Image (spheres, rainbow, N blue to C red):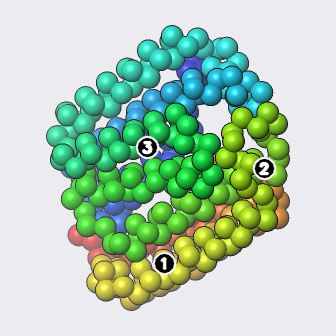
C-alpha cells in the first residue's frame, strides 16, 4: 500500500490546488455548490496527474534505477510490477473521465484535461530531453490547472494572473532543474536536456523570472480588474509575494536546495509563512463584507 501511494504521488497532489484558486479568489469559497464543483474538478486533476506520473515512471524505469534520488521509486526499485502499475494507470484515467461526466463539466473542461494529458504524453515520450522546451511543458501544467478551475466555476480570470501563474511556474521548474545540476542527481546523464544548462545560465533565468513574476503581479494589483474586485488595498498582497520570491531564490541559489516545490513550501517556515500571509490578506480583502 505504501508503494502504491508513492506510485501515484499523493504528496504531489498539492499542485492541483491551483484548480481551487478561482474558487477562493472568485468569492465562491462559502458557496456549497461551488465548493463541491471545484473539489470535483480538483479530483479530476489528481487522478489525471497520478496517471501521468505512472506513465512517466514506466517510460523512465531504466534511467531512474541509476538516478541518485529516483532509484527508490516503486517501479525503479521493483516494489511494484509494470503490469500492475499500467492497470492502475488505466483505472485512474477511467475514473478521471467518469468524474468529468458525472459532474457535468462544460466541454471546455474536457479540452483542458485533454491538453494536460497530451502535453504530458509528449513530455514523457521525448520532449523532456529538449532544453528549455521541457521547462515550458512542465510549467504549462500549472496554467492549465488554473484555467480548468476557472472554467469549472465559470469565473473570469485576469490575464495578468494567468501570466503571473505561468512565470512563477516556470520559476519553480527552473529552480528544480538547478537543484538537479547542483546536486548532480542525474549521474548517468539520462535526462539529455540537462546538458544544455549550467548554474550560471539557470541563475540568470531565475533572476529574470523572479523580476518578471513580481512586475506582472504588481500590474495585476494595479489593474481595474483587481481594484474593482478586491479594493485599492490589494497592493498590500505584493509584500508577501516579494518575500516569498526572495526566500525561494535564497533556498535555491544560496543553500542549493533542489527539493520539489511542494516539499520546500511545507518544510521551510519562511516560504510557508509567505504563502499563509498572502492567502490571509486576500481572504480579508475578499470576504470581509460577506455575504
SS label for mark 2: helix
Q: Residues within 10 Å of mark 3 (few under 14, many from 20)?
A: some
In the displayed structure, 175 sits above or below 233; it is above
Mark 2 Cα shell of 10 Å, populated few (<14), some (14-19), many (≥20): some
Taking the spot 65% from the left edge, 57% from the top edge, the residue there is 174
Q: Residues within 10 Å of mark 1 (few under 14, many from 20)?
A: some
Q: Position of residue 87 (x, y in %)?
A: 44, 15
> Which tag, 3 or 2, sits closer to the chain's start?
3
Position of residue 164 in the picture relative to residue 115 (left or right): right
Image quadrant holding the N terminus, namely top right
Point out residue 34 in the picture as x, y percentages from the top left corner. 24, 52
Location of residue 118 in the rendering, given as x and y in whole percent from the top left corner: 39, 40
Task: State the image coordinates of residue 245 (x, y, percent, origin top left).
Answer: 64, 70
Report the side of 90 relative to 126 (left or right): left
Q: Which residue is mark 2?
A: 181
Mark 3 secondary-structure assignment: helix
- The image shows residue 196, relative to residue 127, as above or below, that is below
How far apart are the two marked residues, 3 and 2, measured between alpha carbons?
A: 24 Å
Q: Quadrant of residue 100?
A: top left
Q: Residue at x 31, y 24 (%)?
A: 94
User: To which residue does mark 3 refer?
Assistant: 119
Q: Classify residue 126 by image quadrant.
A: top right
**Residue at the (41%, 87%) spot, across then down:** 222
Q: Are marks 1 and 3 in contact (CB under 8 Å)?
A: no
For image coordinates 56% across by 76% down, the residue present is 212
Element under disc 1: helix
Looking at the rendered image, the quarter that the C terminus falls into is: bottom left
Residue designated by label 1: 216
Amino acid at each position: 500500500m505504501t508503494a502504491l501511494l508513492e506510485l501515484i504521488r499523493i504528496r504531489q497532489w498539492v499542485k492541483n490546488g491551483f484548480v481551487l484558486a478561482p474558487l477562493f479568489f472568485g468569492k465562491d469559497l462559502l458557496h456549497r455548490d461551488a465548493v463541491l464543483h471545484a473539489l470535483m474538478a480538483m479530483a479530476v486533476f489528481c487522478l489525471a496527474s497520478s496517471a501521468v506520473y505512472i506513465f512517466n515512471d514506466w517510460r523512465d524505469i531504466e534511467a531512474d534505477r541509476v538516478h541518485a534520488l529516483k532509484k527508490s521509486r516503486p517501479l525503479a526499485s521493483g516494489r511494484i510490477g509494470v503490469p500492475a502499475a499500467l492497470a492502475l494507470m488505466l483505472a485512474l484515467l477511467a475514473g478521471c473521465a467518469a468524474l468529468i461526466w458525472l459532474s457535468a463539466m462544460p466541454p471546455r473542461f474536457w479540452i483542458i484535461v485533454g491538453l494536460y494529458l497530451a502535453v504530458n504524453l509528449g513530455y514523457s515520450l521525448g520532449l523532456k530531453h529538449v532544453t528549455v522546451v521541457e521547462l515550458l511543458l512542465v510549467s504549462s501544467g500549472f496554467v492549465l490547472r488554473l484555467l480548468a478551475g476557472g472554467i469549472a466555476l465559470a469565473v473570469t480570470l485576469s490575464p495578468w494572473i494567468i501570466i503571473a501563474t505561468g512565470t512563477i511556474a516556470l520559476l519553480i521548474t527552473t529552480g528544480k532543474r538547478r537543484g538537479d545540476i547542483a546536486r548532480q542527481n542525474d549521474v548517468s546523464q539520462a535526462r539529455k536536456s540537462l546538458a544544455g544548462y549550467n548554474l550560471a545560465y539557470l541563475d540568470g533565468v531565475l533572476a529574470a523570472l523572479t523580476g518578471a513574476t513580481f512586475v506582472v503581479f504588481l500590474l495585476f494589483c494595479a489593474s481595474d480588474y483587481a481594484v474593482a474586485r478586491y479594493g485599492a488595498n490589494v497592493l498590500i498582497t505584493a509584500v508577501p509575494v516579494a518575500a516569498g520570491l526572495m526566500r525561494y531564490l535564497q533556498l535555491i541559489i544560496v543553500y542549493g536546495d533542489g527539493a520539489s516545490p511542494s516539499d520546500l513550501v511545507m518544510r521551510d517556515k519562511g516560504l510557508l509563512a509567505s504563502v499563509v500571509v498572502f492567502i490571509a490578506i486576500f481572504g480579508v480583502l475578499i470576504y470581509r463584507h460577506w455575504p
